[in-house]
Amino acid sequence: MTDFVKAARDFISGDAHADRVVPPSGITARLTTFVSGTMAFLTVFALALSLASGRLATRWGDDLAHSSTLRISAPAGQVAEQTAVAIRVLESTPGIEAVRALSSDEQRALLEPWFGPDLPVDSLPIPQLIEILETDDGYDAAGLRLRLQAEVPGAILDDHTRWRKPLEQAAGRLRLLGWLAIGLIAVSTAAMITLAANAALAANAQVIGVLRLVGARDSYIANAFVRRFTLRALTGGAVGTILGLGAVLLLPSAQSAGGFLTGLGFQGAGWVWPLLIPPLAGGVAYFATGAAARRTLSESL
């Protein structure tokens, strides 16, 4: 551990003579810092999207997995009777924890987003809805449907299976898309830093030639480029991450009625993930610059 700390300290402090090989400013310096900062900013949002999608998939799965809905469609004079029979059947079914028939006001609230607040629920043939809450073990949906078919002809059971699976799949794919975006950002960052390193190497070809004449080894020259570009990427990544976190903090916080877009942020231990972005940016620059420097120096022999 001590050797690692010493190596890191020496890497950061650098060698004054070796640093002269790499231009401290110019287009390559600005390009490296700008690209790293921009990519870090985008990575924050891709990471927020991926983590929010994971939370969304979990929430949708938990909410829909332990609830069901019974819909009773019957003539007006039979709705109350069939509702009472359906409730007795449900209450006697193993695996069902609670049963509740929705009131007219609750059903009106469910339809209000589509039909407006003035919908005359009482005068329309709207099915009676019964909310079913399951236990952790759940119930036998096939067996319950057979009982309801025999005792409550107008009842239709919806165990939310056809809703839950597509929603979970959509959230899972959105999470995968977020991680894929992070991977593409890393590859793009490596490509841009490689181009900047190659440009810096080409611009300093004469200096590199003189260093070789006085006995400097290629590893010494390559390390100078690796150190300078790594620190630039680390600085740009830190600035981009801070700006990205600031932008995320401006987004609406998670709300139960706000849907997905109000929870596009970090929660709990998720705030640790963005802190890894600057070191990752530095790591990408370290390996990309090292590979570019070694390749260019070997070709110029």
Image (cartoon, rainbow, N blue to C red):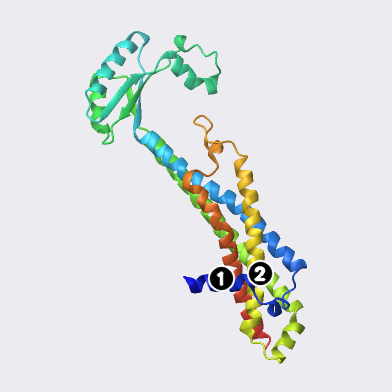
Q: Label 1: which residue?
A: 8
Q: Can you tell which quarter of the image residue 79 is in?
A: top left
Say if mark 1 contacts mark 2, CB within 8 Å. Answer: no
Q: CA distance from mark 1 to mark 2?
A: 15 Å
**Is residue 298 rendered to the left or right of residue 106?**
right
Please identify the quadrant where the C terminus is shown. Answer: bottom right
- The residue depicted at 66 percent of the width and 67 percent of the height is 193
Residue 170 position within the rendered picture, expressed as x and y whole percent measured from the top left:
47, 44
- The residue depicted at 70 percent of the width and 70 percent of the height is 196
**Is residue 101 rendered to the left or right of residue 33?**
left
**Is residue 133 rendered to the left or right of residue 44?**
left
- Disc 2 is placed on an element classified as helix
Q: Give, as a three-letter code, the residue at label 2.
A: Phe
- The residue depicted at 25 percent of the width and 28 percent of the height is 144
Q: Is residue 130 above or below residue 25?
A: above
Residue 214 position within the rendered picture, expressed as x and y whole percent measured from the top left:
71, 91
Q: Can you tell which quarter of the image residue 246 is in?
A: top right
Q: Give, as a three-letter code, the residue at label 1.
A: Ala
Residue 114 versus residue 174: which sits nearer the camera?
174
Which of the two discs, 1 and 2, labels the residue nearer the N terminus? 1
Residue 134 position within the rendered picture, expressed as x and y whole percent measured from the top left:
30, 30
Give the label on residue 229, or none: 2
Give the label on residue 164, or none: none
